Amino acid sequence: MKRWQPFAKPATGEPLAREKDNTAESELFFRRALVVLFAVFLSFLAVAGRLVYLQVLNHERFTTLSESNRVRLQPLPPTRGFIFDRNGVLLADNLASYHLEITREQVKDLDTTLAELRQRIELTDADIERYRKLARRAPPYTGVPLRFRLTDEEIARLAVDLYRLPGVDIKADLTRRYPLGPLAVHAIGYVGRIDENELRRLDPGQYSGSTHIGKTGVERSYEDLLRGRTGWQQVETNAEGRPLRVLSRTPPVPGQHIYLSIDVRLQAVAEKALEDYNGAIVALDPRNGEILALASQPTYDPNPFVNGIDFASYRLLNTSKDRPLLNRALRGIYPPGSTVKPLMALAGLEYGEVNRYSGVFCPGFYRLPGSSHKFRDWRRGGHGSVSMDRAIAQSCDVYFYNLAFNLGIDRIHEFLDRFHLGRPTGVDLPGEKSALLPSQEWKRRVHKHAWFAGDTISAGIGQGYFLTTPLQLAHATAVISQRGADFKPRVLLATEDPGTRIKTPEVPRPLPPVTVKNPQFWDTVIAGMIHVVEGGTAHRIGIGAKYRIAGKTGTAQVFTVGQNERYNASRLARHLLDHALFVAFAPADDPRIAVAVIAEHGGGGSKTAAPMARKVMDAYLLDKYDQPAADGARDTQGDAQRDGSE
């Protein structure tokens, strides 16, 4: 057998295989090792640089981020301040109650849990929808309220089965309460749950953890004072966000207590006086602008609104023809009728168109020059020859038709605007309407028509386009009583720190005074208003009075009577009767109260509105809160016809 030789020359003539070069292989390995070591070194430098960046250059930032994952801030909502009347009667407080809440992260199947809860307590679709919206915004492991104000029976039903409902809990809280119910609701207002629109515009830092906000009245206008300041606590959490312990706590600052200028005793008298009529009564202290009573009829109970009124009840209130949700004192707009005649007389004196002795003959109607149209006086046979004093006392329309024509609408508008008629008074309550003091410019802009002399005639007795609010009438009457001194109407009397119990009175807010060329003009007009009660259209309410009253009756037409028609109240449905108005202040020589009354479809101001004002003034000035205050008998000056309704 032939032996194999590894280096033998092949028979085919191929070259011999080269010997292995160990030196070259070692150099190649060494070079590759250097490349690897260099790559490792660069990687190490990169890791070291990153560590320096994280641990040295950005140490503080990442420490904060790390701490944020471990420590969470939880809001602590403040306690809402109380509301009192001027005598310390409680109008709004916080009642201990219980609510049901769900922590979403602890519930495996939310729909199943909600279905089981519905078998135990009443839950509406609105409750569930509201919960879902709030839960989407809530931090992890935070309980979100589902139902407020649980009853004792509902608490008992839930407590038995809570162990079967993980994530469901019953929590104690405070809920707003209005112990006097409907009394003064249009002034006090109410709080309600924060809705979606409010969530978008509110400061999250201020309202974190809060579920309610002021919706109307004082609760809304003084929300910042009543709410207080939110507190915070640092809570240590685990990796899943579950709270473990409280690390630090900054307590919330409770809201301020508020004292209103309203006297609830007087408020109750005003509301009771109105009980047969829809309308409003506003009583002011003319010396400083404090609102003593702000009644709007009908009223409603604010308590169901706090935690969400049911849809059926709200629809009943919202669609009622009586509109109980409307604050008529601030938002009801009515023609002022003859209550503006004292201001018209003052304008005539100011512009020199009349003096206190100027006389006009009243045949029972007025015609514009060159016109056959008759503008009727309320007294069919007329008043004969009348001076300014008698024109105010007997409410002679013809006198004021003639005066309005001579003044012209521009001067009427300029002068009455000084008394804030047709524009907001600036009261510290939300929603005040401006109403309307017409002018030539307004009619051209709104109606695209020229102003006519007939429009001026109507405005001169507070009719036509002329509209005002009860608050504006009360405010203007207060200015007359103070001979031009003017104060912004307000309901805030004082605030009180709940911790120190220190009261801080609200300072009256004077407005620029209304000035006239001769101070005696005020005396002339006020004398006429005194004679309205002492022998004039409202003489009935002056009987037996222990103080002097200056006032003015008025009516506001609901529909227009044709030239050849007569107004017969006895044949009309109540909703077609005129609105009854009356303004007054007393005592006439040292005014302490100014009142405006509007009774919708009350007929004549003398027979309906004036006795209401007398009741309010008697209660305030004579401390008559527990007994009837005035004779409400019918006036004897022709109630059956519109022209007898002054």
Image (tube, rainbow, N blue to C red):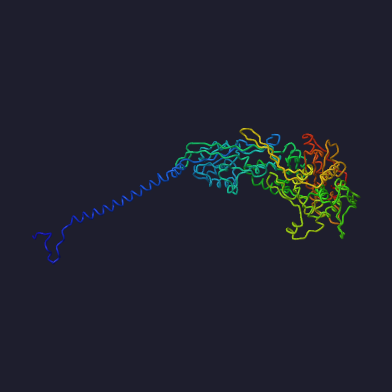
One can see residue 368 in this view: yes
| Residue 485 image position (x, y, % from top left) | 76, 43
Seen in the image, is 167 located left or right of residue 514? left
| Residue 359 image position (x, y, % from top left) | 89, 50
| Residue 191 image position (x, y, % from top left) | 64, 42
Observer-nearest of 590 and 308: 590
Query: Where's the N terminus, which quadrant?
Result: bottom left
| Residue 333 image position (x, y, % from top left) | 74, 49
Residue positioned most to the left = 1
| Residue shown at 80% from the left, 41% from the top | 585
Residue positioned most to the top = 500
Observer-nearest of 144 and 108: 144
Quadrant position of residue 484: top right
Observer-nearest of 237 and 115: 237
One can see residue 279 in this view: no
Q: How many marks?
A: 0
Quadrant position of residue 528: top right
Residue positioned most to the front = 517
